Image: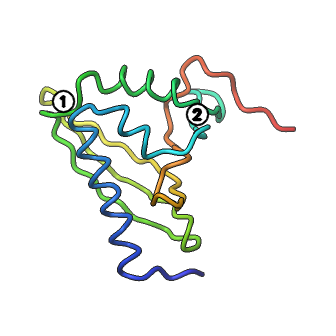
């Protein structure tokens, strides 16, 4: 089992701090610069099964612009992230987050796969339940 150094853990934490700051400002183009495309997505279809797809940069930008609008400023968001390093170059980060929008609290649990590139960490896979409305279910083979 790979044991990351404190410096490696801090680098992942710094990457998320940058991501969060860009998200707060709604800078979707810069968020896309922190990713590797095609990006893998895994979710589930409510009442059904898992659903997977890949997004191009353009598809990611369209989804993030719709989800974030002009950014997340004013949104109360707290996150606890737990990185699980598979190697010096691959880390699965579990996030428990709580957001409050107009007094209504919502909790989320999701994971991201970050890959280390020549330019630094980038996210390549997003895993979160409940996004699969209208997506076809995953099929084996």
Residue depicted at 35% across the width and 32% down the height: 28
Q: Residue furthest front?
A: 118
- Please say whether residue 42 is visible from this viewpoint: no
The residue closer to the viewer here, 112 or 24, is 24
Quarter of the image for residue 44 reads top right
User: Which of disc 1 and disc 2 is earlier in sequence?
Assistant: 2
| 104 over 12 or under it: above or below | above
Q: Provide the residue designation for mark 2.
A: 44
Q: How is the image coloured?
A: rainbow
Residue depicted at 56% across the width and 36% down the height: 43
The residue closer to the viewer here, 139 or 70, is 70
Q: Provide the residue designation for mark 1.
A: 101
- Please say whether residue 131 is visible from this viewpoint: yes
Residue depicted at 62% across the width and 21% down the height: 135
Mark 2: few/some/many CA within 10 Å (<14, 14-19, 20+): many
Q: Quadrant of the N terminus?
A: bottom right
Mark 1: few/some/many CA within 10 Å (<14, 14-19, 20+): few
The residue closer to the viewer here, 14 or 83, is 14
The residue closer to the viewer here, 79 or 31, is 31
């Amino acid at each position: 089992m790979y044991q990351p150094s404190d410096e490696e853990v801090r680098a992942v934490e710094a990457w998320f701090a940058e991501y969060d700051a860009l998200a707060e400002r709604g800078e979707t183009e810069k968020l896309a610069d922190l990713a590797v495309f095609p990006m893998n997505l895994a979710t589930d279809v409510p009442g059904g099964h898992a659903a997977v797809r890949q997004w191009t940069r353009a598809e990611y930008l369209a989804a993030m612009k719709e989800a974030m609008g002009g950014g997340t400023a004013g949104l109360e968001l707290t996150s606890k992230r737990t990185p699980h390093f598979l190697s010096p170059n691959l880390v699965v980060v579990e996030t428990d987050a709580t957001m409050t929008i107009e007094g209504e609290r919502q909790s989320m649990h999701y994971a991201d796969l970050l890959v280390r590139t020549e330019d630094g960490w980038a996210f390549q896979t997003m895993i979160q339940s409940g996004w699969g409305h209208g997506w076809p279910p995953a099929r084996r083979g």
